[in-house]
Image: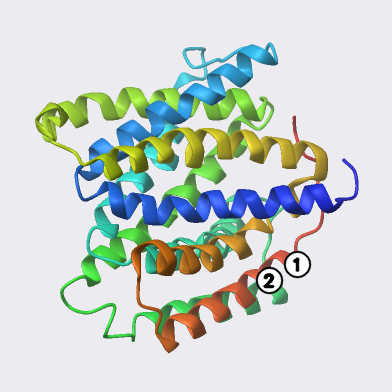
Amino acid sequence: MRPPNFTDYSLLVFLGIIWASAFFNIKIATDSFGPITIAFIRVLLGSIPLIILCFYKNIKIEVFSKDWPWFATIGFVNMVFPFFLIAYGVKEVQSNLAAILMSTSPLTSTLLAHFFLKEEKINILKVTGVLIGFSGIVYLFSDNFLINENNIFSALCILFGSLGYVVGGILTYKISNKKNENVTASILIWATIILLPMCFYFEKPWNYNPSLTSVVSITYLGVIATGLAWVLRFKVLKENGLVFQSQVAYLIPIFAVILGYIFLDEIITFKVIIALLTIVIGIYFVKKSVHPKKILN
């Protein structure tokens, strides 16, 4: 690893924009596709850049190795579960709110890691960050103009979906001796295998008559926001480490709010701004308490 330079910061910002853009593209995709189909096409197309990367770097993909139960479980928890819930929730909730709700992942992971990971014990800074961050979520739910009795279940689905990323991350520690590219390609392939029959049975995607914008958005979600984004994440991890890469958590909800306003003319209320700032501050305190650690390649 080396100290980050201007190019590294630019790449981090670019990565934040890509992941933030996923939310308004999910919103557009829901106009034509069901949530299971969106999740399926996303992991299917997202696996392609990872498979190509593994082939290029001569990394063996162990998708059907003796560790396949771990890959399948993580694929379900970390991809199938959250991708479905996000797509389901965004149908009724603004994409910028979805991004803010999903940004609670670093806060939730702090709590769960304390109980399941020996090296991730909680401290006063983490407690402060978690309390500040979740107070922002509570405040966001008080915005009855954007979250009300008609869509509160959808909002809760998105919030619950963020747990999938957290639990999946904890489970990944069980196979942390393997290369990141191999693990991600394997869980994407398993997520595709799991979603394929579900997609065909429940939503019968061949009956869809999608708009061009929805097709473009769902393709972007798979190839760019899932596949390419994970490739870029590996590059940042390799060159600058986990602590630097984790700073993207600050950028995603901010860019998502901006992009939702630009592309979907989504409403930004005062409570949205306050909740967003509060969550970002909470994440800052959590990240400030983390010491750099050795990254497994």
Q: Height in image: 191 above or below 30?
A: above
Estimate how packed mark 2 is, as few (under 14), some (14 to 19) or many (20 or more) residues with alpha carbons within 10 Å. many
Q: Which residue is mark 2?
A: 284
Q: Which residue is mark 1?
A: 289
Position of 200 with respect to 256 (left or right) is left
Is any part of residue 124 visible from this angle? yes
Observer-nearest of 177 and 249 = 249
Observer-nearest of 185 and 52 = 52
Looking at the rendered structure, the kind of residue marked 2 is Tyr
Which quadrant holds the N terminus?
top right
Return the x and y of residue 177 as percentages of the image width and height. 69, 27
Estimate how packed mark 1 is, as few (under 14), some (14 to 19) or many (20 or more) residues with alpha carbons within 10 Å. some
| Residue at the image position 40 percent from the left and 32 percent from the top | 43
| Residue at the image position 54 percent from the left and 25 percent from the top | 49
| Residue at the image position 53 percent from the left and 40 percent from the top | 171
Name the quadrant containing residue 129. bottom right
Return the x and y of residue 74 as percentages of the image width and height. 46, 35
Looking at the rendered structure, the kind of residue marked 1 is Ser
